[in-house]
Image (tube, helix red, strand yellow):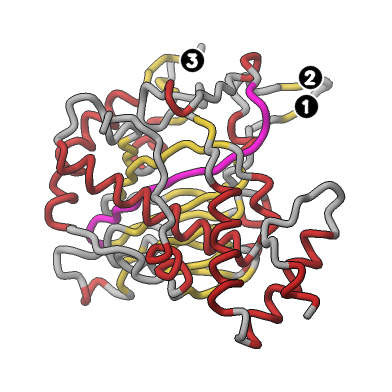
Amino acid sequence: MKRYETDTPELTDEVLEEIRQLRFTDLGGGVVVFHNVMDVDLEFISKWIDKNALAAHQQRWKYDMDINGVVYAKNEDGNKFSIEQVEAVPVRVLEPVQDGTEQEVVDIIRGWEDAIYKSLIRYIDMFPLVVGTIWWRNRGHVLRYDSGKYLGLHNDNDTNYRATGGERYIPYGQVGARQTVAVLLYINDCVSSRDELDGTNYSGGELYFPYLNITHQAKKGDVIIFPTNYMASHGVNTVTGGTRYAYLEFFSQGSPDINTRIEVAEPDDVQTWCMPHWIDTVYDDYQKYCTYIANNYSHSAEYADRQNVLVRNLEGEKGFINPLNIGSHADE
């Protein structure tokens, strides 16, 4: 397999049943936690992340000086940060898979991608109209929060546009505006107090959604999926002990636009791990999942009710083809 191939897992009946049996907690507002989706070899992968984190952090920033002689940093999107902010934000390994990445690491991260995709199919089953907003993806990157680091309140659909004093400040890079779904895979556990720290977990660092009144403690192997819009604005509390590890991915919509730095590659043309690229399987895979449910669980009152609701919702959308393909079952 080539290093940057963009394949998604084949949804055999066995995998479809695995997706059906995923345990989850719906926290509200489109925020859903899928529990224990996969095993994580924390000892191995944390050492690899630690080894690569410092170099990744140093390569991310470019430094300059303003007219007052104050040094500031710019990230890969050209956004300005003070030196204090740079010291507080998480380290991001933005290209975890490169030409020289050892195969064991590549296999682990591909396993994470498979787990995310399976969770995504189940998430779509909960919110079926989201399927029309998933055109392309940026595969994930790794986040590492040392003690004292945090992430301020933000939403992942924001592009930092503003208009003031009669002048519009239109961002050149507008990829964020196209993002619709965010996914975090937790690599280690969040605990409630420093007394519980054991060298593998961390305290503080909870993910919080203030507008939805949600605060969530991570558990290793869980996947959390949520909308990127302003209602799901979120942040990460300050890590008070240990090191927080996670893997972040986005699914997006919209046509490419070179004028706003939105370039979406064909799957066969992807040259880097996180390069935006079309995802052509998700609609067919969701239909496959729905067909599997209809064929194997149509006798269940729970699934019959669920199918009726989904059919009505989807057929209510003008021009929307019903991926369930189970209208006859729903009408019986």
Q: Residue furthest top?
A: 67
Earlier residue among tags 1 and 3: 3
Specify the segment rendered in magenta. 241-256
Q: Nearer the viewer, residue 327 or 30?
A: 327
Asked if 262 appears above or below 11 in the picture, the reply is above
Residue type at numbered disc 1: Thr
- The x, y position of residue 243, in whole percent, is 24, 55
How far apart in space, not on screen, are marks 1 and 2 (Cα)? 5 Å
Q: Residue at x 39, y 50 (%)?
A: 9
Q: Residue at x 64, y 19 (%)?
A: 260
Earlier residue among tags 3 and 2: 3
Residue wearing tag 2: 167
- The x, y position of residue 323, in whole percent, is 68, 56
Residue wearing tag 1: 164
- Mark 3: secondary structure: loop
Location of the C terminus (image quadrant): bottom right
Asked if 23 appears above or below 180 in the picture, the reply is below
Do the CB atoms of the residues marked 3 and 2 lie less than 8 Å apart?
Answer: no
- The x, y position of residue 328, in whole percent, is 76, 71
Residue wearing tag 3: 66
- The x, y position of residue 199, in whole percent, is 14, 64
Label 2: few (<14), some or many (≥20) within 10 Å?
A: few
